[in-house]
Structure formats: structure tokens, C-alpha cells
Amino acid sequence: MFERALPKGMRKREPSIQPWIECGLEEWRVRRVLEFLCEAFDWKKSAGLQLRPDDRLWQIYRYYYPSRRHPDELEIQILDRLLHDEFGGAEDRIDWSKDLTLADLVRWSEVSPRGPTTR
């Protein structure tokens, strides 16, 4: 199975849930969104806790795909599907702006009335 490494600057970080909790985010939602990020980007599940709330999704994407000429954005499409399947319907659109942080994704999940599920 193919597994990517995190972007270079993120690889040396200590895994921690603490920065997320300090932002006031629910731990189970953080862990679920991080799990989806790992699935979408083909990272080891353990790599998720090396991500931080203020990491920007598109900066991560551009690390792997620096050219903007032929973007397919497959990872973003996978992430969108996973998040919507878990937390929201078609009417609950995510604003995929260039400034979107990982904390923004967790906050988006908070508007969902759904609780944790297992896949």
C-alpha cells in the first residue's frame, strides 16, 4: 500500500492532540477529521496528530502538486466526500477557499447534528 510522507516541515513535529483542544475543538471530531485527511492524502493514520489547527489545506495540497496547470484535486474530492458522508448533507457546503485551515474543517463538522460513527 502506498503511503506518503507528510510535508517536510510537518514531519518533525511531535504528535499531539493538545493544540486542537486548546482551540476549543472536540477531540472526537478532531480525530475523525484527521483520520479523513490521512485517508485522502494517503498518510499513515498516526501522522494526523502531527498536523496543527492553523495548517492550511491548500498549502499541504500544493506541497504535493506545485503546478497549477492541470490540477485534479482528487485528495480534496475524497476529503469532501468523507466529510459530507460523516457530518453533513449536500446543502452543507464547505468553503474550499485558499485560506481554509484544518481547524476550519473541524469547525465545519460542528454544525452537524450527527455524532460519531464508525466506518
Image: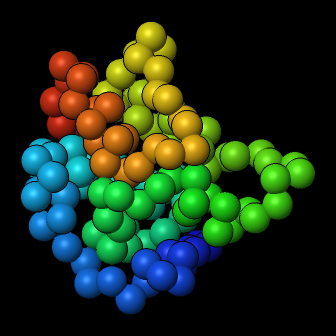
Report the residue at 24% width, 54% height from top: 31
Q: In the rendered view of the protein, which quadrant contains the C terminus?
A: top left
Would residue 78 be seen by someone viewing this image from the given angle?
A: no
All told, the count of numbered labels is 0
Q: Residue furthest bottom?
A: 12
The colour style of the image is rainbow
Q: Position of residue 52 (x, y in %)?
A: 32, 64
Horizontal arrangement in the rendering, residue 47 relative to residue 39 (left or right): left
- Name above or below for residue 114 compared with residue 37: above
Q: Position of residue 45 (x, y in %)?
A: 37, 68
Which sits in the foreground, 21 or 89? Answer: 21
Report the residue at 19% width, 73% height from top: 16
Horizontal arrangement in the rendering, residue 106 relative to residue 7 (left or right): left
Would residue 29 be seen by someone viewing this image from the given angle?
A: yes
Report the residue at 30% width, 57% height from top: 53
Q: In the rendered view of the protein, which quadrant contains the N terminus?
A: bottom right
Q: Residue furthest top?
A: 91
Report the residue at 49% width, 69% height from top: 43
Q: Position of residue 77 (x, y in %)?
A: 61, 39
Q: Residue furthest front?
A: 99
Horizontal arrangement in the rendering, residue 70 relative to residue 95 (left or right): right
Q: Position of residue 36 (x, y in %)?
A: 41, 50
- Name above or below for residue 115 compared with residue 89: below
Q: Which image quadrant is residue 5 in?
A: bottom right
